Amino acid sequence: MNIIIAGDGEVGFHLAEALVNSNHNITIVDPHEELLKMVESHSDLMTIVGESNSVGVLKQANVNKADLVISVLHDEQTNILTAILAKKLGAKTTIARVNTLGNLSEENQKIYEELGIDFLISPEDLAGEEVIEILGQPAATEIYDLSGGKLSIFLIKIEKDAPVVGKTLTQIASEIGHLDFRAVAINRSQDIFIPTGDTAFHADDKVYVITKPEACTELLELGGKKKQDINNVMIVGGGRVGKVIAKRMENDLNIKLIEHDRDRCMKLTNLLDETLIISGDARDIHLVEEEGIENMDAFIAVTNSSETNILTCLHAKKFGVKKTIALVENVDYIQISQNIGIDTIINKKLIAASHIIRYSMGDEVASLKVLSGINSEIVELVARPGSVVTKKPIRDLKIPKGALIGGIIRGDQSFIAVGDFQILEDDKVVVFTLSGVTPKVEKMFFKKQF
């Protein structure tokens, strides 16, 4: 595909980096010349200095031949105009980043579609939704539902007293019998690998597991997790992400939101009906003590400062908070943050990339999730008639190294992958892939092999 990415910072470059591994022709349009020079020195990407909402710049980027135009600048008006112009100039598909989808009615979204914008995406809304999903199953570090929850991907950290510590996958299967879940990847001391039957679990392993809904409780128990009830929540940061979380959850949970900007506090007071708004600095330990941090079940730090979010979550842990969630925008901090004890890390760039990259792939791709901090993906692929994966049982397929089939969704049924399972046409197949392997796996699901 010919893809144009308009950006003014890390989101655009992160997308370009992710997409270049899929053998697309990528052109980056950005107003910052020095930044583009740095990109050119480290990659083969084509770059154009200029404003993406300029007809001349878009023509220079050959927008008339573009299969996909993605505009992810911080300014949503520029993104909207870029997408509209790109479609008018011949681009096949356009995506625009906006600040929030909360105020967009179906009628308004239809208007944007008529103007030429195929998809609107808000990283802040997506991040908020991910936090809300985690609060629904707080014993897990990450959760990703597939096909409406018919299968789910859980990331769990193995506790020191977990029943699986020291046991291999084969031993666990023989002791328990038929399993409705399967480990697809292990992150051990920053080394990510695909387990085999002889792989034994260690304490503190971070394990990605694909599971059926009915097996979630058993899975968490094997990982040494105890049931957690979330009732009292403290949110630090009243920006777009914090606002999305509080608005969605304030009728179900007791929420306190700390925001240092007094003007923003006033606006939040008018927007949120059941949330207690506190004007102050959450780095002030005396303040959070006065507001009852020791009584909180979850602590969510989503300010614009990764450092503040990490620091306040560590403070919360010291006060005994069960679940800590930090928004960390610096990708280099993700592994460190997980290793020092923060339960869940949210990264807007990775979340947005998961949604946007999906549109750059073929019809075979139903969904895709870029995993936090390990440069790997969970991809849901549709088996087309006559594709390689429908020819043989799973054990006889030549799956590329660095990939593992975890589960299959067939209509309303879900299955955990085993060696003798036969994939049928139109099945949705969940595959874990290490960096750069997804395009190789995707070819096995094409209608034809080239």
Image (cartoon, rainbow, N blue to C red):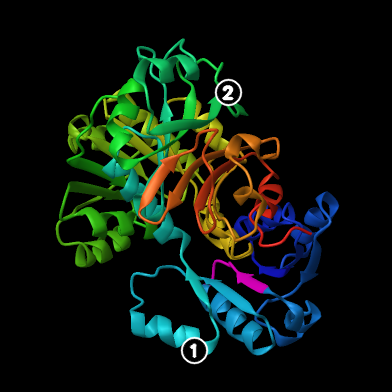
Q: Which residues are magenta?
A: 68-75
Q: From what the image shows, is residue 235 above or below residue 289?
A: below
Q: Is residue 74 magenta?
A: yes
Residue depicted at 43% across the width and 53% down the height: 410
Left or right: where 208 falls relative to 261: right
Mark 2: amino acid:
Thr
The residue where tag 1 is placed is 114
Instruction: Give how far across and how far down residue 93 sits, in percent.
Output: 61, 77
User: How many neighbours does mark 1 have within 10 angstroms: few (below 14), some (14-19), or many (20 or more)?
Assistant: few
Q: Which label's residue is closer to the chain start, 2 or 1?
A: 1
Front one among 182 and 246: 182
Query: Looking at the rendered structure, which numbered label has been put on residue 196?
Result: 2
Residue depicted at 46% across the width and 10% down the height: 166
Residue 30 in view here: no
Residue contact at pointers 2 and 1, CB within 8 angstroms: no
Residue 56 in view here: yes
Mark 1: amino acid:
Glu
Residue 405 found in image quarter = top right
Query: Looking at the rendered structure, which numbered label has been put on residue 100?
Result: none
Left or right: where 63 falls relative to 258: right
For the residues marked 2 and 1, what is the alpha-carbon distance in whole angstroms?
50 Å
